[in-house]
Image (spheres, rainbow, N blue to C red):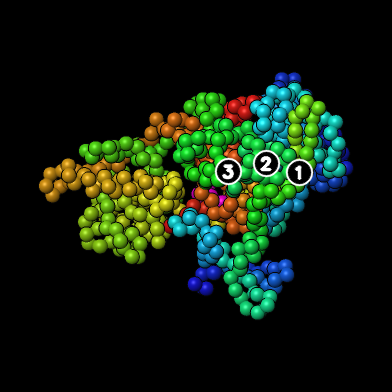
Amino acid sequence: MISNLKSCARALGGGGLALVFAGVALAQAEAPAAAAVGESVANQVVVRDAATGKLRAASAKEARDLSGERAAIPAGQPLNTAPRVHVSGARGVRLSDEFLNHAVIARLPDGSVVEQCFHTPEEAAIAHKSMSIKQAPAALPTE
Amino acid sequence: MNTLKTTLAPIAAAVLLAFSGLASAASTIVITSRDAAGVGFNDPTPVAPVGGNPGTTLGQQRLNVYRYVADLWQAAIDSDVPITVSAGWEALTCTATSAVLGSAGAWNIWYDFPGGVPGTWYPQALANKLAGVNLSAGAPDDGSGYGTVDIKTQFNVNLGNPNCLAGSPFYLGLDGNAGTKVNFVATLLHELGHGLGFSVLSVQTSTGNRINAAGTAYSPTGLPSIWEGFMYDNTAGKTWLTMTAPERRVSAINPLQLAWIGDNGVAGAAETLGATPSIRIVSPVPGLNGFYPYNTASFGPAVSNPDNLGTLANIAPGNPLGQGCTAFSDADRMAVAGKVAIIDRGTCGFAVKAKNAQDAGAFGVIIANNAAGAAPGLGGTDPTITIPTVSVSQADGAILKQGVIDAAQFGRAGRPAAVLALISENKKRLAGADPLGRPLLYTPNPLVSGSSVSHWDVSASPNLLMEPNISADLTTSLVPPKDLTKPLLKDLGW
């Protein structure tokens, strides 16, 4: 239902314009079970195809790129870490920002603010983009 | 008052705060700034002292809060090895209505050090304490100037500015009276907790993989975190230590089933957590009587404990427009008049269902969840709703609906026995713990990959520092009967 859509536009690197619509479920393969019970609704992301010039549903990767979400680091992919060895035989590693916990805050429609901490930057990025912070009284599901 | 020894240095990586001067401190936390001149801790903007923070510049107040929070942690934990924190204020992601406040965590991790569980990753601060030495001492820096520290933190330097949650900057007072601002004491206390060890750390919860022994990649066969032996999944019947990576991934999104089984955490829960708000059922139906946890609604009158909610009633299933989403049929009106209607969640708003039930003469509504998990909080608004509404889990909803049906067998002809619902609390079930009293970790079934398992579950009551939601009613206590942070850390070896 187009009349219910809120939209914003942002640049899509290398792919032309992208229109990001909130309010309609998309990418069912990635849609959570929670969406079925109405706790939240996934963003629908539409991009203008660089080849045809027509709007089309974004691929999972395009949607993820636009949302700010980063895919989980695959097993075996090198991490941004630095190994250490101690004379005792202990082994260590210096981590990186990808391993830090992130605190995110959002102002809700009633003017209050809600603060939540996430285990990964991926979660924090999505929460920041969607303001889908759970358990805040004004952010409760309504259906 | 603590004596602050402060040296303001306008260059990155300069040591700002060396020690607090607390004679009774059980550990020492050294905070080092990465901020450039005029930025963050070095911001010369004049400000008025606030909430016990005597600083007269923005930078000075910021570092006063850091010192205050570090002193709290120093007093709470023991270590002969100084704990090092690299701190900075940076331009993090912002919009007018949301912002990344900051991030923090262990910056180095170790295994196979003296005093630790072999083959197990620990955060460096704890590894140093157990080993009795600074394991990174003498290690070459990685060029950052802070590569060997225990904990790295950064917070949003623009918070409160236009286009960065405008009007809601960090509250830099020490008294907790943050109002509509962001309480930096609570935020920093929480984030430093993660850095000291309140984190599953080396496990990628979205896959269950662990950091390998070389520290170079995630792997299904990587080394466990010290957390994992304390993380017991009641569904799987085992800890994360003995799970496969796919099992850990599933456990991380298994709501209300992942318990912390460390002795200190469990003992602390018994001293800290309150009883679980529950609906108590009284009926002649065998096996039905008992306590059913409920959640509340943002509309209608609040329920109070104790109270008589009323006699339960079912309505007809199968409404193609959603159960309770339209005006009740005559049969449903007869069923719920003067009673409490049990209505399945779905299709339309909770408030719509409640209003339709009210219009049909119901005295109350119980929304039965339509998906696995805990009873949901019920959002929505409708000022015309005058009857109470609560929710129960899908499983409990099914039991209650069947109980109403079964009650027909126990009444007189044409007058089935009543299933009475009372607002109560289950004193045998701690709020935020499993049936054995073990505090629960946060395992929501999320909308995105990953989960927030490195926190207590949000069902804990009272609110705890290390829940994912940083609540306005938190104190700075880290120990029972106010909080469970220290008991968990003690289980790890602190």
Cβ atoms at labels 2 and 1 below 8 Å apart: yes
For mark 1, what is the residue? A81
Pinpoint residue B232: horizontal percent, then vertical percent: 51, 34
Q: Mark 2 falls within which chain?
A: B
Tell me if mark 3 has few (under 14), some (14-19) or many (20+) residues whose alpha carbon lies within 10 angstroms of its own. Answer: many
Pinpoint residue B140: horizontal percent, then vertical percent: 86, 36
Relative to the observer, which residue lies in front, B439 or B231?
B231
Q: CA distance from mark 3 to mark 1?
A: 21 Å
Q: Mark 1 falls within which chain?
A: A
Tell me if mark 1 has few (under 14), some (14-19) or many (20+) residues whose alpha carbon lies within 10 angstroms of its own. Answer: some
For mark 3, what is the residue? B245
Whether labels 2 and 1 share one chain: no
Pinpoint residue B79: horizontal percent, then vertical percent: 72, 24
Q: Which residues are magenta?
A: A133-138
For mark 2, what is the residue? B211
Q: CA distance from mark 2 to mark 3?
A: 12 Å
What's the residue at 75%, 47% (across, down)?
A80
Cβ atoms at labels 2 and 3 below 8 Å apart: no
Amino acid tagged 3: Ala
Amino acid tagged 2: Ile
